[in-house]
Amino acid sequence: IRKYGTTNVWRYCTEVFDYLSLGALINGQIFCLHGGLSPSIQTLDQIRAIDRKQEVPHDGAMCDLMWSDPEEVDGWALSPRGAGYLFGASIVKQ
């Protein structure tokens, strides 16, 4: 607030994040995500069907894609941060 005199700059920046894509497929080979994988998502079309123009919900597929993390676990595990999951190499290979 001191630097800009208003909270509008911060508010506009956070609003921009609500419009950024959840991920990208590069050259049809490299799958990039902000966060991680979701047990609810099996195909790219399921990701494309998510309405991104919203705040990230506290649970569900979009939340998982934003907050899940790779970890040395077998399969899926609950994330200690309370949002998303931990996923192991076996999930990535699927």
Image: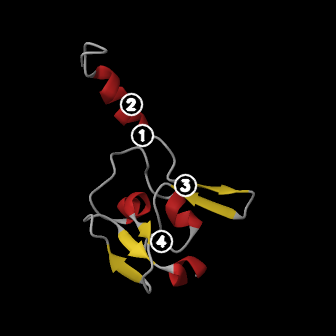
Q: CA distance from mark 2 to mark 1?
A: 7 Å
Which callout, 2 or 4, points to the residue nearer the camera?
2
Residue at (42% x, 66% y) in the render: 69
Q: Amino acid at mark 3?
A: Gly
Q: Position of residue 24 (x, y in %)?
A: 60, 54
Identify which residue is drawn at 32% across, 27% down: 10
Q: Specify the label residue 23 is tagged with.
A: 3
In contact (CB < 8 Å): disc 2 and disc 3: no
- The residue type indicated by label 2 comes to Cys
Q: Position of residue 60 (x, y in %)?
A: 33, 65
CA distance separating discs 4 and 1: 21 Å
Q: CA distance from mark 4 to mark 3?
A: 13 Å
Q: Residue furthest top?
A: 5
2 and 4 marks in contact (CB < 8 Å): no
Q: Tell which circle, 4 or 3, labels the residue nearer the N-terminal end.
A: 3
Q: Nearer the viewer, mark 4 or mark 3?
A: 3
Mark 2 and 1 residues: CB-CB less than 8 Å, in contact? yes
The image's colour scheme reads secondary structure
Mark 2 lies on residue: 13
**Crowding at mark 4 (Cα within 10 Å: few <14, some 14-19, many 20+):** some
Residue 21 place in picture, x, y as percent: 52, 47
Amino acid type, mark 4: Ile
Secondary-structure class at tag 2? helix
Report x, y in % for residue 38: 43, 70
Q: Which residue is mark 1?
A: 17
Residue 48 shown left or right of residue 2 in the figure: right
What amino acid type is highlighted by mark number 1?
A: Phe
Q: Which residue is mark 4?
A: 41
Work out which quarter of the rendered image holds the N terminus and state it. Answer: top left
